[in-house]
Image: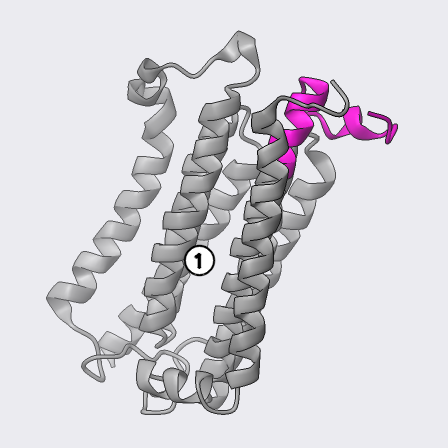
Amino acid sequence: MSAVPIMHGLLLASALFLLGLLGVLVRRNVIFMLMSVEIMLNAAGLAFVLAGARWGQPDGQVMFIFILVMAAAEVSVGLALVLRLYHQFKSLDSESARSLRG
Amino acid sequence: MATETMTSALFYIAGVVALLATLMVIRARSAAHGALYLVVSLLAVAVVFFTLGAPFIGALEIIVYAGAIMVLFVFVIMMLNVPPSRRIRAGFWLSPRAWFGPTLLALVLAAELAYILVAGLPGGAGVGVLGAPDAATGPKGVALSLFGPYMLAVELASFLLLAGLVGAYHLGYRVARGEEECA
């Protein structure tokens, strides 16, 4: 009765996650790294909702709401850190913060 | 039946749009382009949620992810406005190079939504490709679960939001005061 095999949904979620991981690894702009982290969180949430739909339980959607809350808190602190990094080093390059000196 | 085939076609089209938009995010040259494509990617995942029979989660995805979180990103991008050689002016958002790709992908999603509205889907309210939308996976079931067995986790999530608020305020406060300790 299921029109879409769950494997295809999981493939979509893992492809999105891998794209996010690739973005974190190859980009050096911290704003792009934060965006890629958002993509990865979103892909993990998609996997949760898929599993919830597969077994007809609300727990997957509940977990997605928690991931949403965590992403909102993470991005607010992360963007405050980006502002701080830019004021400190006048650059958004993550390499500029490698020395841990002010 | 034909309608079920169309429902799964909606899932695959939205998935392809999500993958394309995400690919464009990580290879975008300017942060403003990346933000536009990321909004499209989140909208596509929201359509995937609709086809999975989770309309409440799809709406939350649009409101919180594509709305609130992306507004924060765009706010920071406009505030920093880097690199200086490629400053984002008001004219940037109006040039076709900036909006053509995201608009094309968003129009695909809009066509999907229009199809859902016009043709309707099996099962009436929910879509339910993978599982039949019943009381357990609808908004009411999610709310009962959220404020039933997961009550403690909801409280912890509110702690987390408070910690995020205090942390962002603390970090932003020093920037506003002008680097008093290490300028």
The location of residue A34, given as percent across then percent down, is 61, 42
Highlighted magenta segment, given as a residue range: A81-102
User: A29 above or below A18?
Assistant: above
The location of residue A31, given as percent across then percent down, is 59, 34
Which amino acid is tagged 1? Answer: Gly
The location of residue B22, given as percent across then percent down, is 51, 45
User: B80 above or below B8?
Assistant: above
Any magenta on residue A82? yes
Quarter in which the N terminus of chain B is drawn: bottom left
View extreme (left): residue: B118
Quarter in which the C terminus of chain B is drawn: top right
Give the quarter of the image for residue A14.
Answer: bottom right
Q: Residue at x 32, y 64 (%)?
A: B59
Q: Residue at x 32, y 16 (%)?
A: B90
Any magenta on residue B22? no
Query: Left or right: B112 with respect to A59?
Result: left
**Chain letter, disc 1 residue:** B
**Camera sees residue B101:** yes
Total marks in image: 1
Q: Residue at x 36, y 49 (%)?
A: B67
Give the quarter of the image for residue A47.
Answer: bottom right
Crowding around mark 1 (Cα neighbors within 10 Å: few <14, some 14 to 19, many 20+) is many
Give the quarter of the image for residue B137.
Answer: bottom left
Callout 1: SS: helix
In this rendered view, identify the residue nearer to me: B135 or B20: B135
Q: Residue at x 32, y 85 (%)?
A: B140
Find disc 1 in the rendering and name its residue: B15
In this rendered view, identify the residue nearer to me: A96 or B112: A96
The location of residue B40, given as percent across then percent down, is 39, 45
**Camera sees residue A12:** no
